[in-house]
Image (cartoon, rainbow, N blue to C red):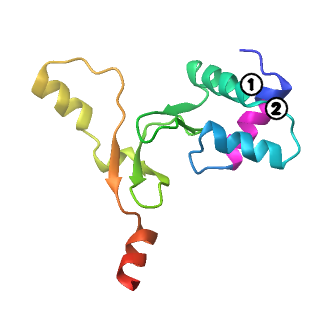
């Protein structure tokens, strides 16, 4: 895959904003940095980076798709209150694929697990209130 100057800048912005940003968030950050890259270009480049495995695309949490520069196996936690996405280590359940295959007879190639609830900061806010 050819890495253009724009694609490199988009990837750099993603890596510098490890909040699992949406396309809109990345576009806003690029604009704040003075980069005149259109939203369609950001969408197109993020999709190409996800297609070739350079980044991960996280769908289904909200209307917006989010992106993750960490392509190593891990899970996600989505806070229902503040809407932030956090990484969780995959070793919290190291045998989940093996157990799922044994119980179903399926051959699992890949999987995504997302936990939903309240993050530590939002839980603290509830206790304070």
The residue drawn where x is 69% and y is 24% is 45
Q: Residue furthest bottom?
A: 128
> Looking at the figure, which quarter contains the C terminus?
bottom left
> Looking at the figure, which quarter contains the N terminus?
top right
The residue drawn where x is 42% and y is 69% is 122
The residue drawn where x is 34% and y is 20% is 109
Instruction: Say which of 98 and 33 sits in front.
Output: 33
- As drawn, the label of residue 41 is 1
- Report the side of 102 relative to 83 (left or right): left
Q: Residue furthest top?
A: 1
Instruction: Say which of 30 and 9 sits in front.
Output: 30
- Residue 52 sits above or below residue 88 on the image: above
Query: Is label 1 in contact with label 2 (beta carbons under 8 Å)?
Result: yes
- As drawn, the label of residue 37 is 2
Q: Quadrant of residue 60?
A: top left
- Residue 71 sits above or below residue 75 on the image: above
Percent across and percent down for residue 34 are 89, 44
Instruction: Using the numbered discs, state the Cα–Cα distance from disc 1 to disc 2 in whole angstroms.
Output: 7 Å
Q: Which residues are magenta?
A: 8-16
- As drawn, the label of residue 94 is none
Percent across and percent down for residue 66 are 54, 39
Percent across and percent down for residue 96 are 24, 37
- Residue 69 sits above or below residue 19 on the image: above
The residue drawn where x is 47% and y is 53% is 86
Instruction: Say which of 63 and 52 sits in front.
Output: 63
Determine the main secondary structure of the stretch shown in magenta.
helix
How many neighbours does mark 2 have within 10 angstroms: few (below 14), some (14-19), or many (20 or more)?
some
Taking the magenta stretch, the answer to whether it contains residue 79 is: no
How many numbered marks appear?
A: 2
Which element type, helix, strand or loop, lies under badge 2?
loop
Percent across and percent down for residue 127 are 35, 81
């Amino acid at each position: 895959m050819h890495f253009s100057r724009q694609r490199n800048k988009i990837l750099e912005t993603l890596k510098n904003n490890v909040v699992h940003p949406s396309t809109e968030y990345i576009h806003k950050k690029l604009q704040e940095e003075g980069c005149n890259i259109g939203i369609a270009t950001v969408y197109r480049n993020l999709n190409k980076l996800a297609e070739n495995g350079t980044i991960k695309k996280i769908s289904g949490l909200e209307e917006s798709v989010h992106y993750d520069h960490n392509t190593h196996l891990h899970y996600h936690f989505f806070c229902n209150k503040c809407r932030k996405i956090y990484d969780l280590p995959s070793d919290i359940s190291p045998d989940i694929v093996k157990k799922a295959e044994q119980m179903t007879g399926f051959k699992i190639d890949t999987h995504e697990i997302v936990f939903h609830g309240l993050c530590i900061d939002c839980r603290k806010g509830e206790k304070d209130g």
